[in-house]
Amino acid sequence: MIIGVAVMLLGLIGVTFAYYTATVKIESKENKTTVVQTVSYANAIMDLGDLITGENVLPGYKVVKPIRVVGNGEKNAQPIAASITLSPSVESFGNHVKYNLYAVDTSTVPNLNEICSHSRPVITNQQYYDAMKCDTTKLGNAILSGRFTGTQKVKKDITVSSNSDTTYFLLIEYENDEKASQDEEQGKSFTVTIGFEASNNEIIYTEAILNGADPILKDNLIPVTIDENGTVAKANKSSEWYNYEKKIWANAIILEDKTIQYNDGEIIPEENIESYFVWIPRYKYRIWNTGNYTGLTSIDNNRIQEIEVLFESREEIVSQGDKVGKYLTHPAFTALDTNGLWVGKFETGYKDAASTAGAEVNSSDASKVVIKPNVYSWR
């Protein structure tokens, strides 16, 4: 905060500068441990610890609040979806209240005194601020950061498993604005209320590289993993069952007998698989050539080109590149307004065909359609 400038500007409108004070509080609605019980899922326990209050603080003041979340339950219990919520009331402070949330394994939690120094008020040479410092090196990278606005709630989704024990550190900073006066904030107070929400909703695995274009399962599709030897097993949707960065595609099947239920990890016999599908995530590609290839009748090895693609969500603005170097969202995704497509993993076959001729059938009987390896193609 540059007081010299502030005094000059305030003097123009006949207002005098007063000693700067503010009150900061971080609290929970009920300063108690919150326990969430679920059936067949992990349990989550959140410990908010003691109420933290700061009074008569200056811009530059910082406070750290630890939040411990412990999961427990049976060894094979499914993880639960949970959220840490931050509900501010900072209407009088513009965007001067900043937040950073860190996650640390409780077994390696540092001492709070190692994170932030004690308050060091500076009240000299017409400067009024707090010079306290914080070192978040031991906390790693922030998993959530930003500035509070008014009463706008902030939420961070987390996953709690039966054996997890994580301490989240919330760092609140009352910013020292070196470019503008904060005189109008003196004598005011703000609060940040920490909350915790949990449910027994199933956790669905997603991959960051897909940018929201993860597989969508419906219409009798069952997610599966396929070993190198061809063994098919039902996939656990809560864990990594595909990895496009490593070129491990998301696969799904439709059963012959849809009344049979399989557990996660259970092998599904080939005779009960009607069709195989693979997920093509929505993507855009960089245009490298706009030449005319209609007259190309043979492979030209001198024209081999790696195509750069970026996965994207249908919520993104459609890329409409029309020249070299620009990105174009593939028209197949924009035409259907979809995040991706399930396509047959193998050529479409005709069920029970015993020869090529037996698969050459002009029929609209959907029950005869199969998408499997080692079958005669339907023509």
Image (tube, grey):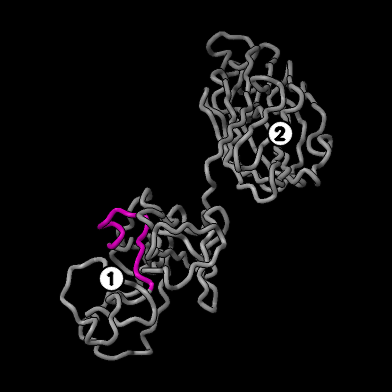
Regarding residue 214, the answer to whether it shows in the image is yes
- Between 155 and 303, the one nearer to me in the picture: 155
Q: Position of residue 228 (x, y in %)?
A: 54, 77
Judge whether 188 appears above or below 64 on screen: above
341 is within the stretch colored magenta: yes
User: What's the CA distance linking mark 2 and mark 1?
Assistant: 55 Å
Q: Quadrant of the C terminus?
A: bottom left
Magenta-tinted stretch? 332-345
Judge whether 85 appears above or below 298 on screen: above
Q: Position of residue 260 (x, y in %)?
A: 44, 59
Q: Position of residue 21 (x, y in %)?
A: 70, 15
Instruction: Name the amino acid type tagged 2.
Output: Ile
Who's the residue at 61% across and 42% down the image?
A: 41
Q: Position of residue 80 (x, y in %)?
A: 59, 42
Mark 1 highlights which residue? 369
Instruction: Name the amino acid type tagged 1.
Output: Val
